[in-house]
Amino acid sequence: MSGFLSVIKERFKEGFVTNNPTFIQFIGMCPTLATTTSAKNALGMGLAVTAVLAFSNTVISLLRKIIPSQVRIAAFIVIISGAVTATELLMKAFLPALNAALGIFIPLIVVNCIILARAEAFASKNKVFPSFVDGIAMGLGFTGALFLIGSVREIIGAGTWFGMKVTPEAYSPATIFIMAPGAFFTLGVLVAITNKIKYDVNERKRKKEANAALALADRAEKPSEEETV
Amino acid sequence: MKEILVILLTAVLTQNFVFIKFMGICPFLGVSDKTDKAVGMSFAVIFVMTLSSAATWCVYHYVLIPYGLEYLKTVAFILIIASLVQLIEMFLKKFIPALYASLGIYLPLITTNCAVLGVALINIQQDYSFLRSVFYGFSSGLGFMAAIVIFAGVRERMQLSSPPRAFRGMPIALIAAGLIAMIFSGFSGFNV
């Protein structure tokens, strides 16, 4: 049981922090920029990708010993596009408004590099359970990033969040943020903030290590002082 | 003639594939650090987009519709594009080695370029005729070329500047792309 928990913890840490698809790896950029015009669309897109990713990772992991390695990319693409078609049909039936808002980007999940990247880097080499968890964790890491970008853009660009008015009356929204250029600006600034945090954390770690080394050196020196006395 | 001009200008300027429709962002950010690389990539994209528009249109209208399999279009199109890219690669390698030498390395990357699948799907969605689809594919490729070549030029200059440390690399490139996108959205005017 603790084995399962540690797998889950490790995968989620990778998906959200150390290997976040959007802020660290820069993959799957098209939907990241195109569908984050509002928090709701961003969340919908993220969850659609998560569903496809969890399904394709599981199936590919199940079939990893059967698929010959020469044709694995083609086989992965067929599995992925099957999953995407199923998702598209389900969304058309149950969430028609969201499907209309996301438009062509739902079928385009097929060529989202995150999915093929996880299939190639993880699911084709690991057991079924870790692959499934990896799909969920990476998908939710992607969803989190999209949700953040979508929220920033919707609040600055439209003054609303999930359609509710959140800014004071006096604020007139900067429409450019829900248009195309705003997507690039928001992502650029958020990546810069991520970089800043990353550098600061590294800096602190280095300082701590340097201090620890100094303390160790001090302790090592002390006995020698006593000996001389 | 007039219609052709409208399609061309729409695809290149007012509805640019990269800056307005956000398709093909991965190669746009990935191979735009040098202008000559960007040019090579965009010729490969124009080539594949035009051919795949023709191929997917034919398959959709002569295979999928007669058998009532329209819902399989995503699966069918991605397979067509992947095998078309493979075929073009083999053909160029064998018969036009000079062209293969300049485009060869970009071809495998194109399979996962969402702009190629995007064009194929838009052609079907908008119910374009055969010639119109092919021409739309060609002009979308030109739009991609305009975007990536301009961006590569900006990025080359940018290497000489020194932004704050946290902005170096991807963030400043994204902000530069935002500024270019603003220019492109100016072509259609700011009305929401």
Image (cartoon, helix red, strand yellow):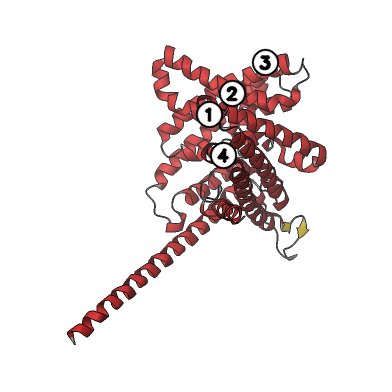
Q: Position of residue B108 (x, y in %)?
A: 49, 27
Callout 4 touching callout 1 (CB < 8 Å): no
The verdict on a common chain for dots 3 and 2 is yes
The verdict on a common chain for dots 2 and 1 is yes
One can see residue B17 in this view: no
A17 lies above or below B115: below
Q: Dot 1 corresponds to which residue? A: B110
User: Which amino acid, by three-letter code, is at mark 4?
Assistant: Ala
Q: Position of residue A175 (x, y in %)?
A: 67, 52
Q: Dot 4 corresponds to which residue? A: A123
Q: Disc 4: which chain?
A: A
Question: Alpha-carbon neighbours of circle 4 within 10 Å: few (<14), some, or many (≥20)?
Answer: many
The verdict on a common chain for dots 4 and 3 is no
Residue extending furthest top? B95
* Helix, strand or loop under label 1: helix
Sequence-first disc among 3 and 1: 3
Callout 2 touching callout 1 (CB < 8 Å): yes
Q: Nearer the viewer, residue B139 or A194?
A: A194
Q: Dot 2 corresponds to which residue? A: B81
* Helix, strand or loop under label 2: helix
Question: Alpha-carbon neighbours of circle 1 within 10 Å: few (<14), some, or many (≥20)?
Answer: many
